[in-house]
Image (spheres, rainbow, N blue to C red):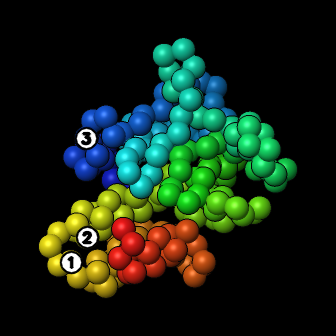
């Protein structure tokens, strides 16, 4: 798992309370690289990504998708029932396939999921770059097109998956940025 982001990067951007670390448990249904990343780097938690981890005693544990969808009487595809819920983007649920380590999103009102990232490190890289875009966007008179281009280049350098599909959740969010809806 190739990562350009570490815990210090997340803590600087999101503050100490804006980073959710997952416990390293043995045995674990996730591959070792994913477990190590979630336990040592974690996931950001903030305005545009809400990390979702349940509490079991004093420890955090990811929710399983089938249980989350059952709460809302939402259809859950059979192959994704055991996936872990990592969090929420503004209009999509972000999940992890523990078998492959790939990250998928379930857009609001959609029945099917979209492949979003090759792994959690790529997700966190993308979230970090989007946070940088958001911070620069809030400056006086931002160059919106330049910010979007910078984001695209930074994300594509690590994992082109999030931007490959024109209808992806990330491309939808970038269109909102272009239209100055943020």
82 sits left or right of 168 in the view? right
Residue situated in front as seen by the camera: 43 or 98: 43
Asked whether, in this view, residue 12 is left or right of residue 126, the answer is: left
Residue 134 appears in which quarter of the rendering?
Answer: bottom left
Q: Quadrant of residue 3?
A: bottom left
* Quarter of the figure with the C terminus: bottom left
Q: Is residue 103 visible?
A: no
Q: Position of residue 29 (x, y in %)?
A: 67, 35
Find residue 74 and report its horizontal and vertical position in percent: 78, 49
Q: Earlier in the sequence, mark 1 or mark 2?
A: 2
Q: CA distance from mark 3 to mark 1?
A: 24 Å
* Disc 1 target residue: 142
Query: Label 3 belongs to which residue?
Result: 15
Residue at position x 57%, y 19% in the image: 56
Judge by depth and name the residue closer to the eye, 87 or 11. 87
Q: Is residue 70 above or below residue 159?
A: above
Measuring from the top left, give residue 172's x and y in whole percent.
52, 74
Looking at the rendered structure, the secondary structure element under dot 1 is loop
Residues at discs 1 and 2 in contact (Cβ within 8 Å): yes
Q: Is label 3 or label 2 in front?
A: 2
How many other residues sit within 10 Å of disc 2, few (<14), some (14-19) or many (≥20)?
Answer: some
Q: SS class of the residue under badge 3?
A: loop
Q: Earlier in the sequence, mark 3 or mark 1?
A: 3
**x 72%, y 63%: residue:** 110
Viewer-side residue, 101 vs 105: 105
Q: Residue furthest front?
A: 181
Mark sitting on residue 137:
2
């Amino acid at each position: 798992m190739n990562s350009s982001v570490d815990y210090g990067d997340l803590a600087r951007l999101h503050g100490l309370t804006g980073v959710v670390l997952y416990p390293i448990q043995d045995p674990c249904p996730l591959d070792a690289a994913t477990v190590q990343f979630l336990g040592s780097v974690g996931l950001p938690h903030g305005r545009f990504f809400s990390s979702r981890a349940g509490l079991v005693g004093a420890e955090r544990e990811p929710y399983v998708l089938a249980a989350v969808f059952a709460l809302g009487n939402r259809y859950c595809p059979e192959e994704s029932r055991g996936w872990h819920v990592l969090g929420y983007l503004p209009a999509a649920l972000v999940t992890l396939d523990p078998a492959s380590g790939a990250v998928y999103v379930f857009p609001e009102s959609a029945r099917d999921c979209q492949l979003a990232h090759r792994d959690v490190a790529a997700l966190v890289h993308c979230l970090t770059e989007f946070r940088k875009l958001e911070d620069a966007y809030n400056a006086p008179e931002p160059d919106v097109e330049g910010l979007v281009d910078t984001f695209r280049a930074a994300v594509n350098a690590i994992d082109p998956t999030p931007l490959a599909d024109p209808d992806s959740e990330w491309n939808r969010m970038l269109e909102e940025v272009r239209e100055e809806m943020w």
